[in-house]
C-alpha cells in the first residue's frame, strides 16, 4: 500500500477519454500541490486498442491547452478493484461493464461516472466519445473532462468524497 488515493479512469478503448482524464487529473493535482497524494491510471472496458498510444487528435487538442501526455492502452480487469480506491467511468455503458465484474458491494461502491462531478452535468451523463467527430468534439470532451476532474479533485481534497 502506498498511502495514496488510487484512481482508475475507464472508457471503452482507453485511447481518448480515460487517458485524457488520467493525465488531466494528475496535472491538476500537481498544480494544486497535492500530486503526491494520488496515483492515477486509465483503462478500457474493451480490448480494441490494447498497447496503442492515445489518439493523436486528442493529444493535439490537449496540447493546445498545455496538456501533453503519452501512455499505452490496457483493458480493465477485475483485479483493478483491489488495486484502486476509485474507478471512474466515462459513461453509463462503461460503468455497467465495470459493475458486471464487481464481486461484492465494496467493489461496486468504488465506481462512479466522471460527470457525477461535472457542475454542468449529472451522474448519468456521458463524457462524449469524439472518436467519430470533428475537432469540435475533441474540444468539447476536453472541457468536460477538465471541469469534471477539477470537481473530483476538490471533492477528494474537501473530504466530500471519502475513499
Image: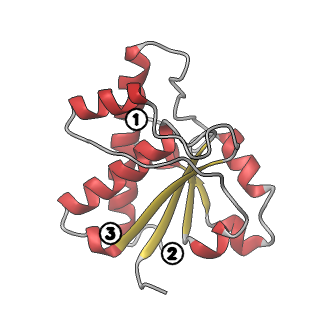
- Residue under label 1, please give it: 144
Residue 157: give its label. Answer: 3
Say whether marks 2 and 1 touch (CB < 8 Å).
Answer: no
Say whether marks 2 and 3 touch (CB < 8 Å).
Answer: no
Position of residue 146 measured from the top left corner of the image (x, y, whole percent): 34, 41
Position of residue 37 measured from the top left corner of the image (x, y, whole percent): 33, 75
Residue lying farthest front? 51
**First of labels 2, 1 by sequence position:** 1
Position of 86 relative to 60 (above/below): below
Report the side of 3 relative to 63 (left or right).
Answer: right
Tell me the distance, in whole angstroms, between the alpha carbons under discs 2 and 1. Answer: 23 Å
- Viewer-nearest residue: 79 or 105: 79
Residue 27: give its label. Answer: none
Position of residue 114 measured from the top left corner of the image (x, y, whole percent): 51, 47
Position of 148 relative to 136 (above/below): below
Tell me the distance, in whole angstroms, between the alpha carbons under discs 3 and 1. Answer: 20 Å
**First of labels 2, 3 by sequence position:** 3
Quarter holding residue 157: bottom left
- Which residue is painted at 53% across and 28% down in the image? 128
- Which residue is painted at 54% across and 28% down in the image? 129
At mark 1, the secondary structure is: helix
Residue lying farthest top? 134
At mark 2, the secondary structure is: loop
Residue 163: give its label. Answer: 2
Position of residue 124 measured from the top left corner of the image (x, y, whole percent): 62, 40
- Which residue is painted at 64% across and 39% down in the image? 12
- Viewer-nearest residue: 15 or 110: 15
At mark 3, the secondary structure is: helix
Amino acid at each position: 500500500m502506498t498511502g495514496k488515493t488510487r484512481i482508475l479512469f475507464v472508457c471503452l478503448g482507453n485511447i481518448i477519454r480515460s487517458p485524457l482524464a488520467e493525465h488531466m487529473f494528475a496535472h491538476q493535482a500537481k498544480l494544486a500541490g497535492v500530486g503526491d497524494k494520488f496515483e492515477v491510471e486509465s483503462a478500457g472496458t474493451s480490448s480494441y486498442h490494447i498497447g496503442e498510444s492515445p489518439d493523436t487528435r486528442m493529444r493535439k487538442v490537449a496540447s493546445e491547452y498545455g496538456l501533453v501526455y503519452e501512455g499505452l492502452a490496457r483493458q480493465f480487469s477485475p483485479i483493478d478493484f483491489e488495486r484502486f480506491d476509485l474507478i471512474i467511468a466515462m459513461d453509463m455503458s462503461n460503468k455497467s461493464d465495470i459493475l458486471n465484474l464487481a464481486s461484492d458491494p465494496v467493489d461496486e461502491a468504488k465506481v462512479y461516472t466522471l460527470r457525477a462531478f461535472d457542475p454542468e452535468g449529472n451522474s448519468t451523463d456521458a463524457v462524449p466519445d469524439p472518436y467519430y467527430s470533428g475537432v469540435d468534439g475533441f474540444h468539447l470532451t476536453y472541457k468536460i473532462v477538465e471541469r469534471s476532474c477539477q470537481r473530483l479533485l476538490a471533492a477528494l481534497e474537501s473530504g466530500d468524497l471519502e475513499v
